[in-house]
Amino acid sequence: MKTDTPATILAAQENAAPRARPWKAAIALVLLAALIALPLFSKNFFVFQLTLAMVYAIAILGLNLLTGFNGQFSLGHGAFYAIGAYTAAILMDQAGVSYVWVIPAAGVVCFVAGFLFGLPALRLEGTYLALATFALAVAMPQILKFSPFEHWTGGVQGIVIMKPDAPFGLPVNQDQWLYYFTLFTLILMFVFAYNLVGSRTGRAMKAIRDNPTAAKAMGVNLSLYKSLTFGVSALYTGVAGALSAIVVQFVAPDSFTFALSVILFVGLVVGGVGWIPGALFGALFILFVPHLAEGVSKGLAGAVYGIMLILLIFVMPSGAAGLLRLLFDRFTIVRRLFEGSSGRKR
Amino acid sequence: MDLFVHQVLAGLATGAIYACMALAVVMIYQAIDHFNFAQGEMAMFSTFIAWQLMEWGFPYWAAFFVTIGISFAAGVLIERTIFRPIHNAPILSHVVIFIALFVIINSFAGFIWDFTIKSFPSPFGTRPVLGQGLLSAHDAGMMAVVGIVLLMLYGFFRYTRIGLAMRAAAANPDSAKLVGVRVGWMLALGWGMAAAIGAVAGMMIAPVVFLEPNMMLSILLYGFAGAVVGGLTSPVGAVLGGFSVGVVENLAGTFIPYVGREMKLSIALALIVAVLMVRPSGIFGRKIVTRV
């Protein structure tokens, strides 16, 4: 088990990554075409659900940058999601800012918040950081209800936002437009994440994850990179929060409880820690599996969900990333065998 | 000054709750080196078992001790079945399992006993012992129970062979194995004891906060805060930490406008972050030195 940590599997993947794989680009293109065509042929509610899944994917991607590539834990990303959502809602509600601009604004606010929370959290490792972020997540709804801020936050009632119309007279309805808007943001965030992870900064992040002492000896500024990563991770989650506020049209303190942080964390693990596309799988899981669980048993939905998680850790500890890798390896082995035998015949 | 003294006393009363929980947190931390995020839910479930036993006509103290026994067995069982196979896995897997346990236990409790609030009897009664409504008989009884549990733990770890073996297993697993300590079972024993202490904490807390599946989330947070303030390596520290968290919470509620009353959980957050920054080993804990 020890040699099979997500990190080692990922290291192998990362080494393999730079080689150009034409089929990878092909898969991405087909997927993109399908994603663009999908809302034109589906019901509005399904479009809404898919939009929400993409929003979750952005948040999970943020968490993945922190945990998968920098080795820091967070059980409190729901708090940053909340900060992003509230920033967006307050800007739109109080200042009348357009929905396009509230998203980068929410990102910046969350970056600062994450960076500041990351500073003290730097001294904490492993479970201590999980504990501090756990406390943040549990305390968040109370902070949002804090009465001196009620003028802006709307207290327990929260804030209601209007759904934006499609611009330039595009022939799509509001749900479809939000879908495309979210898809665009998602792609932007994924490209940014790929570039970040492949850059000098990304290598520093991974070095800290794999061996902090060695990284320090190589001249990596641990405290700077760790808090920066925390900030970037919070930025991603904040952008997702802002998008969620626009998509759901409503923010209230009780939508951002500890349960939200748990959901994001579960999505991370299911998708595969340290594998960027895993965020998509994780998001689909956290959106649709609870419904499946409810289908199994209404009252015991939580239990079914939990048991699935335990099974996942036992059977497939590296999530969807591990599963795909396994399938791919099998495929390669079969092909090699086939090619080998036909070669001998010749 | 009078107000101050009153608030300190009232703080000690709530602190007793946190001290119970902090003690359970430290026990499990000693055994497995992780925070058990499902600890609060385990305690809640045990309390429901006690409630059910009493509904079936058990007298209080019989239900009390039977529940402790059941919880101990359940704790051992959880370690053996779920954590034993992954004891070498990365921390992340452990945290996921804790979260999964949290959801499972919470969901089962809601399924079996539903989400309505139930009242839980106190064995000590509720008449005031000190002042008017400052320290009730239940508060005093709770403090006494915490004291007794602490003494028993001290005696167990200090004077029994098995306590010594548990300490050895936690301090140096490899060497402990070489001298014949069954390290795996010591872990399971630690889980069982933590579950049993959690059950005691739950049954002491329930008369104050009422019994329902979500009763433990905020208390667990305060329990963590108490454990961190006191030091995760010291049961005595955890108890004192729990009491001081209660006092700080109460004083802040009285003397800081707005913040104290509405942001009580944020006080726990601030305490945790502050202590971890200034003195990560807590006030009574010993420093842990790691070799690289």
Image (spheres, helix red, strand yellow):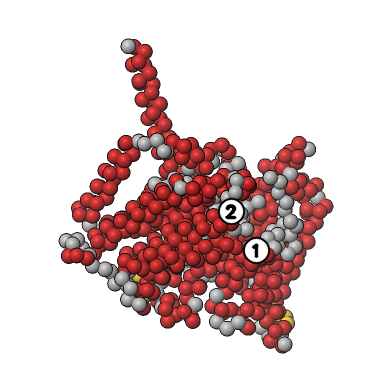
**Residue under numbered circle 1:** B277
Q: Mark 2 and mark 1 in contact? Answer it, CB < 8 Å.
A: no
Q: Residue furthest right?
A: B159
Does residue B68 appear left or right of residue A109 in this picture? right
Taking the spot 33% from the left edge, 57% from the top edge, the residue there is: A185
Instruction: Depth check: give the residue in front, B37 or B288.
Output: B288
Closer to us: mark 2 or mark 1?
A: 2
**Residue under numbered circle 2:** A222
Taking the spot 63% from the left edge, 46% from the top edge, the residue there is: A217
Q: Quadrant of the N terminus of chain B?
A: bottom right
Question: Can see residue B1?
Answer: yes
Does residue B113 appear left or right of residue A36 in this picture? right
Taking the spot 34% from the left edge, 68% from the top edge, the residue there is: A101
Does residue A60 appear left or right of residue A29 in this picture? right
Question: Can see residue A309?
Answer: no
Instruction: Depth check: give the residue in front, A339 or A120.
Output: A120
